[in-house]
Amino acid sequence: MSTSINELSPFQLDVLKEIGNIGAGNAATALAELLSDRVSMSVPELSIADANEVVSLLGGPENPVVAILLTMSEDVKGIIMLVFEEKFLNVVLRTLLGKEIDSLSEMSELDRSVFMEIGNIMSSTYLNAMSQLTGLNISISTPDICVDMAGAIMSYPASLFGMRGDKVLIIKEDFIGQERITSHLVMLPDEDSLDIIFRSLGA
């Protein structure tokens, strides 16, 4: 019988949080290298939430955000989505391209390409940490970028993958360099994949 996100024990949640801690540490290192800056991070906050709760955590349905969406395959299947607010985007664009934008609607194709690569690198660090800890093979798809309000963003994977009504794992972390910037990682592994992850870790 498969384990659903709703049924996770406190110990299993701690296991996922530890994976998140290590993945976030790797992401902070990758971000520091990209921005040529010293970046530290807060302790990641892991929550289990439905789509409406996630929208609240992302600042409300009308908060403009950028999301990088990828699908996981091989031993672990599901969806992973990194969500960033405008401030995070501007820190990256200012550092890498020497520019800022007043609104996410002003993003150029170059801006999108740069940010999609940032999201791809950060997602890869999370999943590499999970792969190393579990010994499982995890592949990710080519990233897809979506720029919209948080409410619309959460309907995007729902329309593609039928996640409507499901609980998701969401990990929030603050990266502290010259400025504090926040990212949210939304992950929806399928139930069989959760069992595979926990079995590989003896949990």
Image (tube, rainbow, N blue to C red):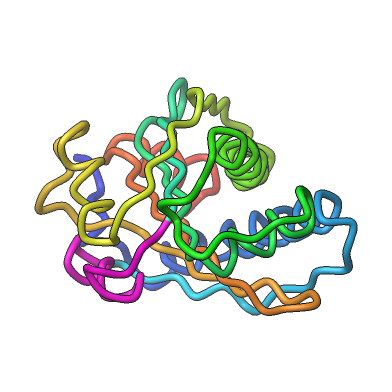
Count how many numbered circles sit on residues in the image: 0
> Vertical placement of 81 versus 88: above or below?
above
Q: Is residue 71 magenta?
A: no
Q: Residue at x 49, y 70 (%)?
A: 172
Q: Residue furthest left?
A: 165
Image coordinates for residue 12, horizontal then vertical, percent? 42, 62
Q: Is residue 64 magenta?
A: yes
Q: Is residue 130 visible in the rendered structure shown here? A: no
Which quadrant does the N terminus fall into?
Answer: top left
Q: Residue at x 44, y 38 (%)?
A: 145
Instruction: Report the front residue among 3 and 112.
Output: 112
Q: Residue at x 37, y 71 (%)?
A: 47
Please provide the residue range marked out in magenta.
49-65
Q: Residue 6 sits in which quadrant?
A: bottom left
Instruction: Report the front residue among 38 and 111.
Output: 111
Q: Residue 49 sits in which quadrant?
A: bottom left
Q: Residue 92 sits in which quadrant?
A: bottom right
> Vertical placement of 7 versus 123: above or below?
below
Image coordinates for residue 114, horizontal then vertical, percent? 65, 39
Image coordinates for residue 119, horizontal then vertical, percent? 58, 44
Relative placement, left or right, of 189 versus 31 is left
Q: Is residue 63 visible in the rendered structure shown here? A: yes
Instruction: Report the front residue among 97 and 184.
Output: 97
Image coordinates for residue 113, horizontal then vertical, percent? 59, 33
Q: Residue at x 56, y 38 (%)?
A: 116
Relative placement, left or right, of 151 versus 93 is left
